Every structure is written in structure tokens, then in C-alpha cells.
């Protein structure tokens, strides 16, 4: 089984990407300067456009919790994940290194992404920052494994940041989310093909992203699980394990 390429796709995708990632920030800043309330929706249009340009065909299932604040907790496979998950009205939580990534790091800052250093001593500060957002009715999107995987399993969720949902006014919903890469160019994926999309380990970003340009459309499935509440569990760890189990079970169902 070989990956399906069409090099004509790369011919139009390169200029389309350059135009899209240039014009959207300009519109965002212009809208903010003119105090146009609609400028806050620009990141969501950006993500939809990126899905179209890159050939990410996304199918959603389940019901997105729209009663903010929500802590969305998802598995993580690739930097591409942010585009399908851009359907969520929320703020991504990312490691501090992402702020320095070309293009994606810049646009992440437009969304007021929370950049956290992965240091144990910063945990209390990170929780306080997250709770400030949640208390203001702003939903957050957390890649709960703390890393990305090859796309066929879900690592144990890190429980520490789940503590951010331990506030009662307002009560914070926790919604697990499963994302899965299913097929490419109409054929079911094996791991060799999935590795063109999954970004993990020591894979270099530049060459990995460039290799996507001639690839035919990829099918992605995103499932929103029923919400739960931290206060309904005996411990934070129990809540974390519950969410991880749902996400992992659905991933296995999707990839067969």
C-alpha cells in the first residue's frame, strides 16, 4: 500500500497557503482595530480554510458542549489536529515552544493561546491561569497526553491540569474528544501512510509539513463524548482515567 500523491495539488496549495496565512492575520488585526466584534471569529474561518487547502476532510460526531466554560480534553496525533478542532469555540493550551514555530506559532498567538512551560514548578501558575479563563466563561482545549503519538493508541492522560476544572462558580464541564486519521486518497491507512500525517518523536517539522503538499485528501474523524464533571469523581485521577478510556476506545473503533 503506497501513499497517493498528486503533484498538481502542491502547485496550487503553496500559493493558496501563502495567501491564506497572510490575509487572515491582516483581516484579524484590521477588525480588532476597527472594533468589529466579528474579528473574534477569524481563527475559526482560518481553520476551515486550512482544512480545505490541505485536503483535510473532517467528519464530526457526538454533540459539542456549547455551555461554556468547557475543558475539552483530546488525544494528540499531529500539528494538523488544531485545524479540525478549530470548530470548537475555545482557547488551545500549547507548550511554550509552539510560540516560536513558523506560521502556526504566530497564528496561535492571535487566538490568545495559553503557552505553558513544561516544568513541574510552574504547575500552580498554569492552573491559576487556566482557571482565570474558565471563570470568565472561556473554554479551553487541552491535548491531555502531553505529547503526540503515532495515531493508533492513546497515552495516559496527565491529570495535573484537570485540576483547573475544580471550580464551582461557574461549574466547568469536561468533554473528552477523540481525533483519528482514517484513510488517505480513499484507501485505508497503514502506519507508513499515517506517518505522513502523524507527527511524533524526533520527526523534523519542515520536511514533514512539505511532504503533505502533494498528498490527496485525508479522512479525519472527530468525536465529542458526553461531558462529565470533576466533582462527580472520587479523585482527579479517576476523572482523568475515565476520559482517557473513552477517547482510547473510540480511537480503536475508528481505526478498526
Image (cartoon, rainbow, N blue to C red):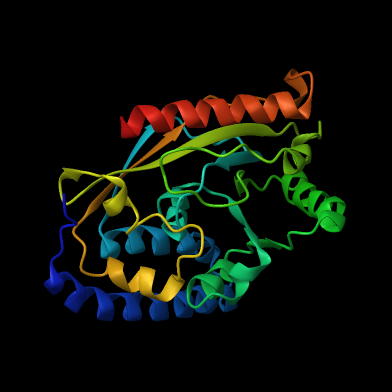
Compared with 170, 215 (above or below) is below
Residue 123 x, y percent position in the rendering: 82, 52
Residue positioned 57% across, 70% down in the render = 110
Query: Is 181 on the left-hand or right-hand side of 187?
Result: right
Query: Is 233 on the left-hand or right-hand side of 184?
Result: right
Residue positioned 29% across, 69% down in the render = 211
Tell me, yes or no, if residue 132 can be seen here. Answer: yes
Tell me, yes or no, if residue 225 can be seen here. Answer: no
Residue 184 x, y percent position in the rendering: 22, 50
Residue 34 x, y percent position in the rendering: 56, 77
Of residues 136 and 217, which is closer to you in this image? 217
Q: Quadrant of the C terminus?
A: top left
Residue positioned 26% across, 81% down in the render = 15
- Res. 242 image quadrant: top right
Residue 37 x, y percent position in the rendering: 55, 63
Query: Is 124 on the left-hand or right-hand side of 4?
Result: right
Compared with 90, 242 (above or below) is above
Of residues 156 and 45, which is closer to you in this image? 156
Residue positioned 59% across, 40% down in the render = 73
- Res. 114 image quadrant: bottom right
- Res. 208 image quadrant: bottom left
Amino acid at each position: 500500500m503506497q501513499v497517493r500523491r498528486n503533484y498538481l495539488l502542491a502547485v496550487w496549495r503553496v500559493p493558496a497557503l501563502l495567501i491564506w496565512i497572510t490575509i487572515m492575520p491582516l483581516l484579524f488585526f484590521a477588525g480588532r482595530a476597527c472594533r468589529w466584534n466579528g474579528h473574534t471569529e477569524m481563527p475559526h474561518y482560518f481553520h476551515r480554510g486550512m482544512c480545505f487547502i490541505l485536503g483535510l476532510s473532517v467528519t464530526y460526531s457526538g454533540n459539542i458542549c456549547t455551555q461554556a466554560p468547557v475543558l475539552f480534553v483530546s488525544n494528540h496525533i499531529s500539528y494538523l489536529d488544531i485545524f479540525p478542532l478549530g470548530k470548537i469555540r475555545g482557547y488551545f493550551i500549547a507548550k511554550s515552544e509552539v510560540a516560536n514555530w513558523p506560521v502556526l506559532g504566530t497564528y496561535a498567538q492571535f487566538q490568545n493561546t495559553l503557552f505553558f512551560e513544561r516544568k513541574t514548578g510552574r504547575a500552580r501558575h498554569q492552573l491559576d491561569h487556566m482557571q482565570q479563563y474558565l471563570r470568565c466563561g472561556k473554554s479551553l482545549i487541552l491535548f491531555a497526553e502531553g505529547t503526540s503519538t503515532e495515531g493508533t493508541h492513546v497515552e495516559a492522560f496527565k491529570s495535573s491540569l484537570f485540576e483547573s476544572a475544580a471550580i464551582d462558580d461557574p461549574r466547568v464541564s469536561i468533554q473528552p474528544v477523540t481525533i483519528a486519521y482514517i484513510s488517505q486518497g480513499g484507501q485505508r491507512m497503514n502506519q507508513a501512510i499515517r506517518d505522513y500525517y502523524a507527527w511524533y518523536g524526533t520527526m523534523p517539522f519542515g520536511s514533514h509539513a512539505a511532504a503533505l503538499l502533494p498528498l490527496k485528501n485525508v479522512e479525519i474523524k472527530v468525536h465529542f463524548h458526553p461531558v462529565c464533571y470533576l466533582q462527580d469523581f472520587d479523585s482527579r485521577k479517576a476523572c482523568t482515567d475515565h476520559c482517557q478510556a473513552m477517547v482510547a476506545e473510540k480511537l480503536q473503533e475508528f481505526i478498526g
